[in-house]
């Protein structure tokens, strides 16, 4: 088992006799650490995974499973409970589970123990700016390293970006050889995140001593505070994780409506400005205000006629559309 990797295990409670036992509860303790932050245990309740609280006592961690008053165990009872455990640090740990009656907790009805050696895990780090502006392409790095002597197979890196309102709020490029290619992403509407993966579908091997950095170009298209979380996965378990938060604001002096890449619409088409197609500077020596007040005939222009297929004051052209991924 690797540090930081989530591993599943099960505990079976079986009454092979025909005598019912009332008020049964499962107690457990974990030796090897007395810091509750070093171990995380989840149990499955229906379709949800809930965290079991841990407490430090006598140099180890203790906890309990089941209601405070216990639960009845009928004759022939046979049930298996599902758990997930994560050790934050490398080391050797021992766990003991005891089924007891609440009235006499010192007398176990059944006991099981197991030992586990936790190796140092993979290390995942990310780099990039903490602040940027809308539509600015920023460089983000993700480094995966294996400081252990144990190789890990089938590793993939998944990511999610929170703070988005739609899948169009962010675009990502990855370097492939000497070129940059769009990285496909999807919008998870239920969680309000943009998600994706890096690497081949079946994962890739991470040998001992592995240390590689991947470079990405990330562009955010709306102001918000975004959090990108990267997770190294193997066998469906998270074995390393890194997160990066970036604040994205509009460029100084510009409003959302004035962004250069905002396409005009029928109701928000902007007026032509110097340098735009169809812009006329007007006769020299006249103020801009005076030019606006003069009629087309005074300016030597043909009268402007408005029709369904015409656009006043020059033509406009929408920005180049980005391909959706």
Image: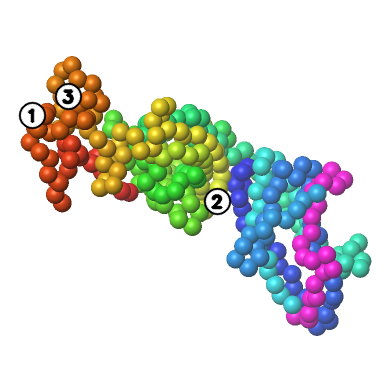
On screen, residue 110 above or below 286: below
Q: Foreground: 4 or 219?
A: 219
Residue behind mark 3: 281
Question: Distance of mark 3 from mark 2, alpha carbons?
Answer: 64 Å
Decide: is 317 above or below 105: above
Q: Residue at x 31, y 39 (%)?
A: 262
Q: Say how many tags the image has.
A: 3
Residue depicted at 74% across the width and 73% down the height: 14
Q: Reading the chain from its start, which is encountered first: label 3 or label 2?
A: 2
Disc 3 is placed on an element classified as: loop
| Quadrant housing residue 58 | top right
Q: Which one is closest to the eye, mark 1 or mark 3?
A: 1
Answer above or below: position of 56 versus 123. below
- The residues bearing labels 1 and 3 have C-alpha atoms spaced at a distance of 13 Å
| Image-based side of 127 in relation to 295, left or right | right
Q: Are marks 3 and 2 in contact (CB under 8 Å)?
A: no
The colour scheme of the drawn protein is: rainbow
Is disc 2 surrounded by few (<14), some (14 to 19) or many (20+) residues within 10 Å?
some
Q: Nearer the viewer, residue 309 or 2?
A: 309
Q: Residue at x 41, y 40 (%)?
A: 222
Residue 101 position, x and y percent, is: 87, 68
Stretch in magenta: 56-76
Label 1, on which residue?
A: 300
- Residue occupied by mark 2: 237
Q: Residue furthest top?
A: 285
């Amino acid at each position: 088992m690797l540090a930081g990797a989530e591993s599943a295990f099960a505990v079976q409670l079986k009454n092979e006799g025909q005598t019912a036992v009332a008020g049964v509860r499962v107690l457990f303790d974990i030796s090897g650490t007395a810091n509750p932050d070093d171990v995380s245990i989840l149990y499955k309740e229906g379709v949800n995974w809930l965290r079991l609280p841990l407490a430090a006592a006598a140099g180890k961690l203790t906890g309990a499973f089941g209601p405070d008053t216990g639960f009845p165990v009928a004759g022939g009872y046979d049930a298996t409970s599902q758990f997930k455990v994560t050790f934050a640090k490398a080391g050797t740990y021992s766990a003991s589970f005891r089924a007891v009656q609440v009235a006499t907790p010192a007398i176990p009805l059944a006991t099981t123990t197991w030992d586990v050696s936790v190796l140092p895990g993979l290390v995942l780090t990310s780099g990039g700016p903490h602040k940027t502006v809308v539509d600015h392409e920023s460089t983000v790095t993700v480094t995966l390293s294996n400081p252990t002597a144990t190789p890990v197979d089938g590793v993939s890196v998944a990511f999610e970006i929170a703070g988005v309102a739609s899948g169009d709020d962010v675009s990502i490029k990855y370097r492939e050889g000497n070129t940059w290619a769009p990285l496909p992403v999807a919008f998870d509407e239920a969680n309000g995140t943009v998600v994706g993966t890096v690497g081949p579908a079946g994962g890739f091997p991470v040998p001992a001593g592995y240390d590689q950095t991947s470079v990405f170009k990330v562009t955010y298209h709306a102001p918000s505070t975004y959090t990108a979380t990267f997770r190294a996965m193997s066998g469906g378990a998270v074995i390393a994780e890194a997160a990066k938060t970036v604040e994205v604001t509009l460029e100084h002096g510009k409003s959302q409506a004035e962004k250069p890449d905002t396409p005009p619409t029928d109701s928000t088409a902007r007026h032509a400005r110097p340098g735009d197609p169809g812009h006329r500077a007007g006769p020299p020596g006249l103020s801009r205000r005076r030019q606006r007040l003069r009629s087309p005939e005074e300016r030597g222009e043909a009268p402007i006629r408005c029709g369904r297929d015409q656009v006043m004051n020059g033509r406009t052209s929408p920005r180049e559309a980005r391909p959706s991924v």
